[in-house]
Image (spheres, rainbow, N blue to C red):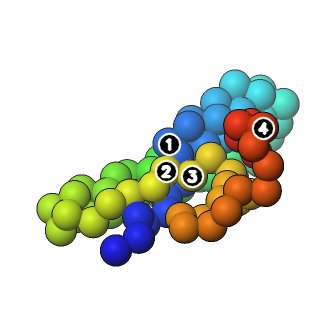
């Protein structure tokens, strides 16, 4: 069976840091948008937790996982477009 593609955990971390460090400061403490940003942060943390549950389920079922860094990453079994070795 081909590996199951899942987002790399770093994508969640990047979004959470952006929202917590920059977006939250930009909307301000008394802004009505603060609650929306906070809700988005909670939602992302839940999504990461759900992905981890899926990963554990796949491990128990002996299903391989392929962590993806980009949508442009070659799919298993496909031929890469270049030999540059760079990650898209």
- Looking at the rendered structure, the secondary structure element under dot 2 is strand
Q: Residue furthest bottom?
A: 1
- Looking at the rendered structure, the secondary structure element under dot 1 is helix
Query: Up-down: is 12 above or below 81?
Result: above
Looking at the rendered image, the quarter that the N terminus falls into is bottom left
Label placed on residue 67: 2
- Looking at the rendered structure, the secondary structure element under dot 3 is strand
Query: Up-down: is 75 above or below 85?
Result: below
Task: Please rate how many residues cluster around mark 3, counting C-alpha atoms within 10 Å: few if below 14, some from 14 to 19, many from 20.
Answer: some
Q: Which badge, 1 or 4, is on the more N-terminal residue?
A: 1
The residue labelled by disc 4 is 84
Residue at horizontal 54 percent and vertical 67 percent from the top: 77
Q: Which badge, 1 or 3, is on the more N-terminal residue?
A: 1
Q: Which badge, 3 or 4, is on the more N-terminal residue?
A: 3
Q: CA distance from mark 4 to mark 2?
A: 20 Å
Residue 30 in picture, x, y percent from top left? 76, 35
- The answer to whether the residue labelled 1 contacts the one labelled 2, judged by CB atoms less than 8 Å apart, is yes
Which quadrant would residue 57 be assigned to in this image? bottom left
Is 52 displayed left or right of 25 in the figure?
Answer: left
The residue labelled by disc 3 is 68
Residue 50 in picture, x, y percent from top left? 38, 59
């Amino acid at each position: 069976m081909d590996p199951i593609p899942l987002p790399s955990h770093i994508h969640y971390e990047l979004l959470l840091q952006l929202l917590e460090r920059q977006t939250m400061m930009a909307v301000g403490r008394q802004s009505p948008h603060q609650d929306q940003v906070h809700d988005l942060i909670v939602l992302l943390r839940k999504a990461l937790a759900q992905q981890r549950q899926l990963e554990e389920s796949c491990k128990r079922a002996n299903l391989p996982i392929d962590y993806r860094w980009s949508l442009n990453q070659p799919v298993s079994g496909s031929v890469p477009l270049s030999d540059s070795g760079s990650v898209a």
